[in-house]
Image: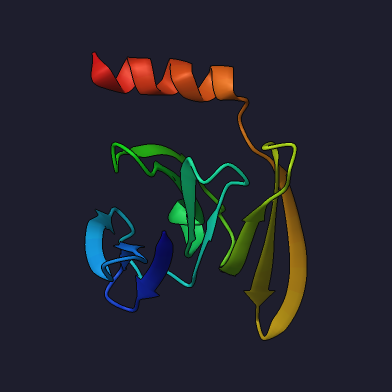
Amino acid sequence: MLATAANASLAYLWDTESWNSVATFRGHSRAIHGVGFSPDSRRLITSGFGREAIKLWDTTSHQEIITLGDEDSTIFQDPALLEDNRTLIVMGIKNGSPGLHVWRAPTWEEIKTAEAAKAQ
């Protein structure tokens, strides 16, 4: 799989054998500035701006799992989820100054609970 982002607030998932688009992810109201995968490739991470700073997506169902917001005017780029599947590292740029942001992502149990709540 390969993920790409577009300035039109979309991200795409591609099959690298056929180079066909597998899914289009919509949900950011502004441009997506970065994409990344969880270490097990089960989740796609998209990074943006403001209340939609980070979104986690399921790469199988193509559904949004959770949104992590930020009240600042920071643009988030280059998201990465570390091997523990909980530590999310993202480069943030505010007023031209870069900074590293570290968040603790939800556990798989928390994600499953959020997915079950959305399904109801």
Q: Position of residue 33 (x, y in %)?
A: 48, 72
Colour pattern: rainbow
Q: How many marks?
A: 0
Q: Is residue 74 left or right of residue 53?
A: right
Can see residue 77?
yes
In which quadrant is the N terminus drawn? bottom left
Q: Position of residue 112 (x, y in %)?
A: 46, 19
Q: Is residue 67 left or right of residue 23?
A: right
The structure residue drawn at horizontal position 72% and vertical position 48%, both measured from the top left corner, is 82
Q: Is residue 100 above or below residue 82?
A: below
Q: Nearer the viewer, residue 24 or 52?
A: 24
Quarter assignment of residue 92: bottom right
Q: Is residue 74 left or right of residue 58?
A: right
Quarter assignment of residue 30: bottom left
Q: Nearer the viewer, residue 93 or 84?
A: 84
Q: Is residue 120 above or below residue 76?
A: above
Q: Position of residue 8 (x, y in %)?
A: 27, 75
Q: Is residue 81 above or below residue 117?
A: below
In which quadrant is the C terminus drawn? top left
Q: Position of residue 67 (x, y in %)?
A: 45, 43
Q: Residue furthest front?
A: 17
The structure residue drawn at horizontal position 34% and vertical position 16%, both measured from the top left corner, is 117
Can see residue 74?
no
Q: Residue furthest bottom?
A: 96
The structure residue drawn at horizontal position 65% and vertical position 57%, both measured from the top left corner, is 80
Q: Is residue 64 left or right of residue 48?
A: left
Quarter assignment of residue 106: top right
The structure residue drawn at horizontal position 67% and vertical position 37%, both measured from the top left corner, is 85
